[in-house]
Image: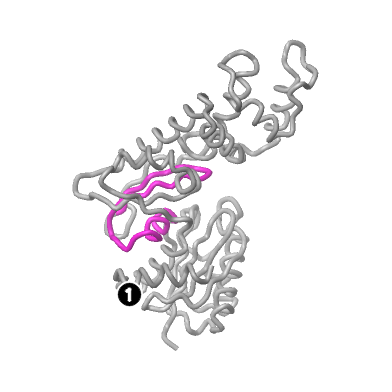
């Protein structure tokens, strides 16, 4: 059997593994839980990378001896650059190769294109823009997390939904359908009696619920803005436009004359919301944005490249097609 390469896309929610040949054929996929060493801790992240690897080998009906190399694309890999926390458990389990760590943002970019240079904007729960040169991240803007940045992200939009919905109810802003949508999402009675003197009971109940959430969970409320904007709510439309403007500014900060494109969009805010994507895409009107749902194809792409394989366009196309067929 020809040597195989292992690409790992380790995210905060799930870990995906792809086993691929040098010609781009995907032989097996595997899935497991979170692979982020910051949010989950290195021990659990390593366990899930191992579980996804085993599942990919089982799917391909191959043994670990067929592996010639591999990479793990993840956020938070900087916490342990020596990689012992990841490769130690793999070696103990009989996986002989040593994985190198790669940025998840690079894998996201290379999931949509075989080109060495270009730009990427990812807007899901968080938001970040990157410039890629020579198959490496050259520059990054935002991605600073819910407290310090992530402008235009799902968290950011959800946060604006809450602020606008509550401000409208206590008279600080114009009425908006976001208020009723917010109370419905939180299962709060809009006519709840006051429990704090002078404050509408619905606001207090909403606050009580929201302060039990982790801040990033406000991203769950982002769809309320998109739905209300589509229905014609002016406040929601302004939020969506501001999100697109912020993401476009992040992309514009990455642009340089000697890299005309391509530009890759990832994350639900861009992939699932054409209005936002159009606003951001205006930064590079001559480029049609390439969309990607995750970094798995890019992780496999990187595994081949770091293993010395030249990933031509036909190889990339086969990689994209065969990974997609096994999902």
Instruction: Say if 140 sits above or below 240 in the image.
Output: below
The extreme left residue here reads 258
Circle 1 residues within 10 Å: few <14, some 14–19, many ≥20: some
Color scheme of the displayed model: one colour
Which residue is rendered at x = 29% and y = 71% of the image? 312
For residue 125: magenta? Answer: yes
Q: Is residue 40 above or below residue 181?
A: below
Q: Quadrant of the N terminus?
A: bottom left
Q: Which residues are magenta?
A: 104-132
**Considering only vertical position in the picture, is 279 above or below 263?**
above
Would you say residue 79 sits in the magenta stretch?
no
Residue nearest the viewer, comparing 33 with 36: 33
* Outermost residue toward the top in this view: 198
Residue 93 horizontal/vertical position (percent): 60, 77
Q: Quadrant of residue 33?
A: bottom right
Of residues 133 and 298, the one drawn nearer to the viewer in this rendering: 298
Instruction: Give the labeled residue for mark 1.
Output: 309
Left or right: 39 as drawn, with respect to 268: right
Q: Residue at x 46, y 42 (%)?
A: 127
């Amino acid at each position: 059997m020809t040597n195989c390469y292992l690409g790992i896309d380790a995210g905060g929610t799930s870990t995906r593994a792809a086993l691929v040949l040098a010609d781009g054929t995907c032989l097996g996929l595997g899935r497991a839980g979170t692979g982020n060493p910051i949010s989950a801790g290195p021990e659990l992240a390593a366990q899930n990378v191992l579980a996804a690897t085993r599942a990919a080998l089982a799917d391909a009906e191959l043994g670990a001896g067929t592996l010639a190399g591999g990479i793990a694309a993840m956020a938070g890999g900087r916490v342990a650059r020596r990689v012992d926390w990841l490769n130690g458990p793999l070696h103990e389990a009989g996986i002989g190769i040593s994985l190198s760590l790669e940025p998840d943002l690079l894998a996201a970019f290379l999931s949509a294109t075989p080109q060495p240079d270009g730009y990427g904007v990812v807007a899901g729960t968080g938001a970040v823009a990157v410039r890629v040169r020579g198959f490496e991240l050259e520059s990054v803007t935002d991605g600073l997390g819910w407290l310090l940045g992530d402008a235009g992200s799902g968290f950011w939009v959800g946060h604006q939904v809450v602020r606008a919905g509550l401000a409208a109810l206590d008279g600080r802003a114009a009425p908006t359908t976001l208020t009723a949508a917010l109370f419905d999402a939180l299962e709060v009675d809009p006519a709840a009696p006051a429990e704090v003197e002078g404050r509408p009971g619905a606001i207090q109940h909403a606050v009580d619920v929201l302060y039990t959430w982790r801040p990033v969970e406000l991203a769950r409320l982002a769809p309320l803005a998109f739905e209300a904007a589509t229905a014609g709510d002016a406040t929601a439309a302004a939020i969506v436009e501001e999100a697109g403007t912020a993401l476009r500014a992040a992309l514009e900060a990455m642009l340089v004359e000697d890299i005309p494109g391509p530009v890759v969009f990832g994350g639900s805010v861009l992939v699932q919301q054409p209005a936002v994507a159009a606003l951001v895409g205006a930064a590079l009107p001559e480029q049609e944005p390439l969309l990607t749902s995750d970094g798995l194809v890019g992780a496999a792409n990187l595994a081949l490249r770091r293993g010395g394989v030249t990933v031509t366009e036909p190889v990339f196309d086969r990689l994209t097609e065969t990974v997609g067929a096994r999902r």
